[in-house]
Each structure stands twice: as C-alpha cells, then as structure tokens.
Amino acid sequence: MRFLKSMILYRPVDINLIKTKFNFLIKELDDGDIKLLNELLVRLHPKLKINGKDVYMNGRNIKFMNENNEPTIFQSNKRWTIEIAIQGYKTSSSGQVSPIWKINEATII
C-alpha cells in the first residue's frame, strides 16, 4: 500500500448514492468527473483508472449534511454532492492496482 502524505479531495456534484451492505455505490458520475478523477489517479500510479460511471466506495464515518449545511441522516431518494478523499493506492498479489479512497462528506442538493 502506498499512502499520500496528504490526501487529495475531489467534489463531484449531482450524483446518486446507493447504500449497500458495506459501502456506497456512487451512480451517474459525470463524464467530466470521470476524466478528472482518471487524470488524478494516473498521477498516483499508471494503472489506476475508473472504468465506468458507477463506483463503489468506502462509506464509514461520512458526514451527511442537508441543504442548510446541517447534519442529517442518509436519504436514498436525494441527489448529492460528495467529497471524495483519495488517500493512495494498493496493489494486489495478482498485480491489480486500486485506489484507497473514501467518501468524507455528502451534502443534499
């Protein structure tokens, strides 16, 4: 595992979040967000890449905020702006490289 000295924060706007058993599924990433995230990730490691508009991400300790920037609970029927914290990358024994990242905060739009 390779961790950055300081994490990179990125904020995609107007996405759909789906809560799974252990993580969150980020749906409908914009093409521009995918392009920018891929540019960030390839600087960390040449094999890092997002392959589609839907991404699973760790969701422990997320701060959920409402439209007035006040704490709230997760609401599956809302659109969100999220803050992604890119912390580094890991390499599996088979050579597959994947990002170490999580959702820090999610705000209803």
Image (cartoon, grey):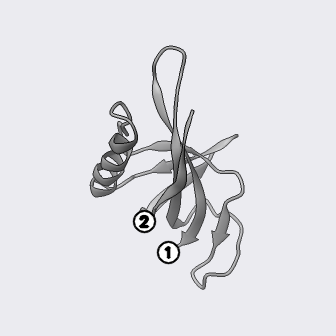
Residue drawn at point x = 57 percent, y = 32 percent: 1
Q: Which quadrant of the structure image shows residue 104?
A: bottom right
Label ID, residue 14:
2
In-image side of 46 versus 70 (left or right): left
Give the CA separation, mark 1 to mark 2: 7 Å
How far from the left and from the top, in percent, is residue 8?
A: 47, 57
Label ID, residue 44:
none
Against 94, is 59 above or below?
below
Residue closest to the far top: 94
Given residues 50 and 98, the one toward you in this image is: 98
How far from the left and from the top, in percent, is residue 84?
A: 51, 57
Residue drawn at point x = 39 percent, y = 52 percent: 28
Q: What type is the residue that disc 1 sits on?
A: Ile
Label 2: element kind: loop
Given residues 5 and 67, the one toward you in this image is: 5
In-image side of 65 versus 56 (left or right): right
> Mark 1–mark 2 contact, CB under 8 Å?
yes
In-image side of 99 versus 52 (left or right): right
- Residue that label 1 marks: 109
Q: What type is the residue that disc 2 sits on?
A: Asp
Residue closest to the far bottom: 68
How far from the left and from the top, in percent, is residue 96?
A: 46, 22
